[in-house]
Image (cartoon, helix red, strand yellow):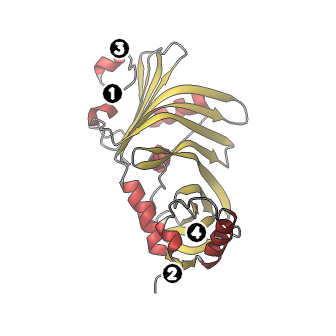
Amino acid sequence: MMPVISLRRLAAVLWMGGLLAACQTPGPVAPHLQQETLALDTLLGSLKQRQQGVADLKSMVRTTVENPKVRQSFKQALVLKNDEAFRIDTYNVFGQTLGVFIYNENQPQGVRTVMYDPAKNRVFVGGEVRHVLQETLGLSLDFREFLPVFYGGIPRLERLRVTHARLSPDKSIYQLIARDPVEGNEVWIDVDAYTLLPVQLMRVETGQKIYTVQWDDYRSVGEHRFPHQITIHLKQRGEILTVKYTDPQINSGVASDTFLLSAHEIVVPATGF
């Protein structure tokens, strides 16, 4: 039998809250809250369906990078497509391009990461990019791991195997503990019990926190509920990345060549979407 998470106590809490609002017009209730129990496959299915519903995303963002030595903030344009491609253009206060970073699983030359520095008129590729990011931003991020995080997705969700699940003591969060059979570590996922939206993720290896992700400020974007603030905390290095979105667009159509650095862009820096 598929594991289930009891909603009896949660329903009682909602019922008591309803007594306090008896004079108000009742609002819509999420279908899963009307069930006596919530099947684990229903919860996982909801998370997977949500991620599969995002084909592409683009938005202006304010990105803040913090480490034990420095705190920096940047205005950027973010574009991503599925779990395959990601692009960030960074601008100065005058709107001029300071740099272009591209991660693309389908780069024709087979090099996934490319970075262009207009000031030096130089293109960095592969391992050079990680070094430059560490030197300039004080941040070293595995974009292959974190790409889904930027649209509110859970990395490698399709291969995770949930081993434990419970409702939090205050009945507001479903807490899932999953095993990554490839990496051999655990992923702890907190899901809002009312909306079934992910709010926090933590990857743990041999009892040590590797990183945490926090999704905040969910708002409607078309048919989607999208987190307008995302925070990644790399625990062992003390690095924190916070991304705040402005007017994000989901599934608006992003061309594949957006993630290819053209000769034209090197001569004339990118100016946005």
First along the sequence among labels 2 and 4: 2
First along the sequence among labels 3 and 1: 1
Q: Quadrant of the C terminus?
A: top left
Q: Residue at x 51, y 64 (%)?
A: 29
Amino acid type for the residue under numbered disc 1: Leu
- Asked which secondary structure carries label 1, the reply is loop
Pointer 1 residue:
261
Mark sitting on residue 177: 4
User: CA separation, marks 2 and 4?
Assistant: 13 Å
Amino acid type for the residue under numbered disc 3: Val
Pointer 2 residue:
3
Q: Residue at x 40, y 44 (%)?
A: 222
- Asked which secondary structure carries label 3, the reply is loop
- Asked which secondary structure carries label 2, the reply is loop
Contact check, label 2 and label 4, Cβ < 8 Å: no
- Asked which secondary structure carries label 4, the reply is strand
Pointer 3 residue:
268
Question: Farthest right residue?
Answer: 68
Please identify the quarter of the rendering in which residue 114 is found. Answer: top left
9 or 114: nearer the eye?
9
Residue 86 visible from this viewpoint? no
x then y, percent, for residue 75: 53, 25
Question: Farthest front residue?
Answer: 23
Question: Farthest bottom residue?
Answer: 1
User: CA separation, marks 2 and 1?
Assistant: 48 Å
Amino acid type for the residue under numbered disc 2: Pro
Contact check, label 3 and label 1, Cβ < 8 Å: no
User: CA separation, marks 2 and 3?
Assistant: 56 Å
First along the sequence among labels 2 and 1: 2
Q: Residue at x 55, y 75 (%)?
A: 163
Residue 267 visible from this viewpoint? yes
Disc nearest the viewer among 4 and 1: 4
